[in-house]
């Protein structure tokens, strides 16, 4: 059976979608079937993998409303072994539509259970807020991967996220584990980046990945071409760092 990992952080702009796209693509290169789920109404994960959102006729919205089973909504991407459950702007209305539905926080979990054994990893990309969409991701996941931008305000956001995880474990998903903490947008020339990295390691210890994602132009450019960085510029530092992260996750190595 595969493993479901939610990529979440209530702070925006930390590299959640970038991480899902590039980590998933790197693992798919290792001949693993990978599914990514776009739970953000903005649909950046969907467009970042080269899918025209206007051409989508079935999306995650249809899972929440019960119009289609998950098997009919998952589609192939242009990249071998990489599949996606896409998002459209319709997701904006989900929270209001499901306000009176019982167990609404477990809808995604129930859908994933039907197809979980078909994929080595399932990655859930969440919006930067603690609403019903993010809650469904946290309830559905075996573990959470937390991208942390190497800046001061990220440390404040981690405290808030820790309280959220405690709430989710207490009320909905007691087995939710921290898969790992990923340092992103690291600038080797910036003293603050080093200080933030040191503080995060001090607090989370072995949960922090050895791999650090640097600030890199390729990681910013690749989505506009509908490609993961490894298919846009495989020799870039950004692409290589996510390949290293994939190996670290696949073989569960966090050696220093």
Image (spheres, grey):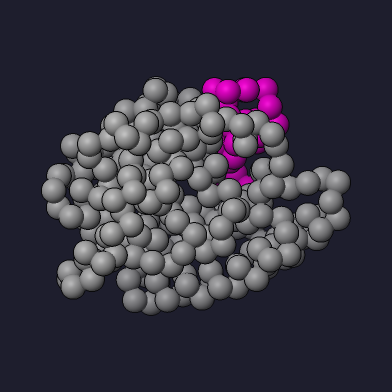
Q: Which quarter shows the N terminus?
A: top left
Q: Report the residue at 44% width, 32% height from top.
A: 49
Q: Is residue 183 above or below residue 115?
A: below
- 144 with respect to 139 (left or right): right
Residue in view at x 48 percent, y 28 percent:
226
Q: Position of residue 201 (x, y in %)?
A: 70, 60
118 or 60: nearer the eye? 60
Residue drawn at the location 71% of the way across and 42% of the way down: 214
Please give left or right for residue 191 compared with residue 201 in the image. right
Give the residue at x 32% y 28%.
Answer: 76
Residue 120 falls in image quadrant = top left
Residue that sits furthest to the left in the current view: 67
**Which segment did they paint magenta?**
229-256
Question: Main structural element of the magenta stretch: helix, strand or loop?
Answer: helix
Asked whether 244 falls inside the magenta stretch, the response is: yes
Q: Residue 62, position in %: x, y?
A: 20, 48
- Residue 26 seen anywhere in this rendered image of the structure: no
Please state if 139 lies on the left or on the right of 146 as rendered: left
| Residue 247, above or below 8 | above
**Towards the viewer: 128 or 248:** 128
Residue 46 showing in the rendered view: yes
Q: Is residue 250 shown in magenta?
A: yes
């Amino acid at each position: 059976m595969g493993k479901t990992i939610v990529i979440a952080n209530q702070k925006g702009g930390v590299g959640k979608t970038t991480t899902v796209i590039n980590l998933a693509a790197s693992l798919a290169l290792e001949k693993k079937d990978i599914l990514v789920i776009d739970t953000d109404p903005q649909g950046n994960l969907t467009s970042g993998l080269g899918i025209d959102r206007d051409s989508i006729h079935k999306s995650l919205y249809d899972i929440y409303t019960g119009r289609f089973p998950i098997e009919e909504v998952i589609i192939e991407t242009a990249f071998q072994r990489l599949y996606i459950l896409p998002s459209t702007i319709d997701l904006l209305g989900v929270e209001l539509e499901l306000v009176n539905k019982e167990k609404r926080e477990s809808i995604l979990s129930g859908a994933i259970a039907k197809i979980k054994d078909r994929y080595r990893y399932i990655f859930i990309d969440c919006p930067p807020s603690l609403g019903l969409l993010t809650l469904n991701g946290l309830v559905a996941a075996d573990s959470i991967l937390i991208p942390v931008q190497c800046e001061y305000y990220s440390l404040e956001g981690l405290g808030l996220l820790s309280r959220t995880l405690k709430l989710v474990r207490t009320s909905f998903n007691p087995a939710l584990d921290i898969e790992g903490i990923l340092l992103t947008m690291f600038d080797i020339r910036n003293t603050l980046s080093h200080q933030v990295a040191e503080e995060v390691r001090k607090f989370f210890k072995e949960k922090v990945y050895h791999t650090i994602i640097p600030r890199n132009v390729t990681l910013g450019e690749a989505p506009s071409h509908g490609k993961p960085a490894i298919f846009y510029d495989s020799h870039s530092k950004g692409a290589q760092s996510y390949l290293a992260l994939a190996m670290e996750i696949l073989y569960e190595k966090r050696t220093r």
